[in-house]
Image (cartoon, rainbow, N blue to C red):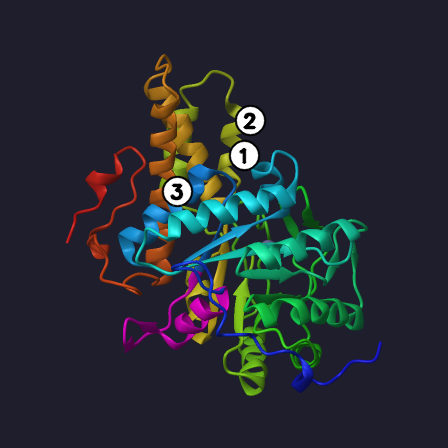
Amino acid sequence: MALDSYKHTPPLNLERKFPENMTSAMSLLYKAKRGEKGNVVGKRYAVPAFNVTTFQSINAAFTAFEMLGSSGLLAFSNSALKHFGRGEAIFGLEIVSDYIAKMASRTKIQVATHLDHGDYITEKGRKVVQAAISCLSSVMADNSTDHVNQTHTDLADNIGLTREVVNIAHPLGVSVEGELGVLAGEEDEDTHSEISTYTNPQELERFLRETGVLMLAPTIGTMHGPNKGKPGSKVKLQIDLAHTLLKIANSIDERICFVIHGASTLYQEVTSYALSSLRKFESAEASVKKWEEFVGTDWEQIVDIVQAGFCKINTDTENRQTFLAKLLGTVIKDPAKIDIRFYDISCTEGLTQSYLRKLIMAGNYGVWYEPKIDVEDFRFDLAKPLQELTSAV
Ligand SMILES: [Zn+2]
């Protein structure tokens, strides 16, 4: 496949006007990479991409962003879009983009919407990516793995397909995330892989130059899903490789932002809270064992690579775990409460706590205005209502 050089790839159109308070993911990430909050440039921080799957999770994320004055990034997988669209991903895109534009119009933060693991390999996937380019402000072109046939694509094919996405998205101001290397684990029913390969530095240079993407997910040792290794073990990230790859990217274009997939940590408080509820159920041994075997990514290693310049961290599993733990605790608290809102409010608050915690861990607060709560004083406790955990400043 003959490819033009990098200089012929369309640059990201930074003049594009999105709905009020909305912007491309790239603009939020580059701000984080420069450590920019308000008019001050300080320590680098990261923007967590929350994989939202229900209106409840969108609402919880907005509450957390607004409490902290954070840059907001909401990501949608193909299966989440099908859920929103009653079985149709493209209808789901139309629904969520309208809903989020309405929500964003009432905030004072900036929000981006992102298609996670867009598939530009299959005919069906291409239609979703093209619709996402017109509905969202950022898309991932995951062309390194053919998820239908479970194969690793050739570098030239990955470059060619990603470049096609850049050609349509960049002129519209929609940022594109490429993927190089294969990440193992199961993200959801549409995205899973048995194999894992690290990103090759020589391939990275060629990929970045020939596609023109400004966001890139390299593979440096994280995994998708709730079981990132044997129970009790630690995920080992390839920190030296991460630094080598960053150096190459920065020499091509210092705006290039790296993304960590499979960055979910494990919240011990969530596991303890879930286990205390589960033990009240009869015959819950198998579920107790599953909870005890969850292995997350070691946060200390993520902090290191955020400081080195990775600025988007994809997290989902710990939010799903928090939701389930809070649901278990809510049911145990009052199993005869016949009021859907009781469970909805309780679980939304649980999710908000999970998002607050990750935003604070990532340093993504006080970006658009000073946080409305005392960040140092935030305590994560699913047994308590949100307002008791957050003292206002
Ligand atoms: Zn992923």
Q: Which amino acid does label 3 sit on?
A: Asn
1 vs 3, front mark? 3
What residue is at 57 percent from the left and 46 percent from the top? 94
In the image, is 62 to the left or to the right of 298?
A: left
Give the magenta part as a residue range. Answer: 25-47
Pick the quarter of the image with the N terminus.
bottom right
Q: What element carries label 1?
A: helix
Name above or below for residue 27 compared with residue 142.
below
Looking at the image, do the residues carrying marks 2 and 1 touch, with CB atoms under 8 Å apart?
A: yes
| Label 3 crowd (10 A; few <14 / some 14-19 / many >=20) | some
What residue is at 67 percent from the left and 51 percent from the top? 128
Foreground: 357 or 156? Answer: 156
The residue lying furthest to the right in this view is: 1
Q: Quadrant of residue 135?
A: bottom right
Foreground: 41 or 229? Answer: 41
Name above or below for residue 55 compared with residue 104.
above
Q: Earlier along the polypeptide chain: callout 3 or callout 2?
A: 3
3 vs 2, front mark? 3
Residue at which label 2 appears:
286
Residue 290, numbered label: 1
Residue at which label 3 appears:
59
Residue 247 location (% of width, % of height): 54, 83
Residue 243 location (% of width, % of height): 53, 78
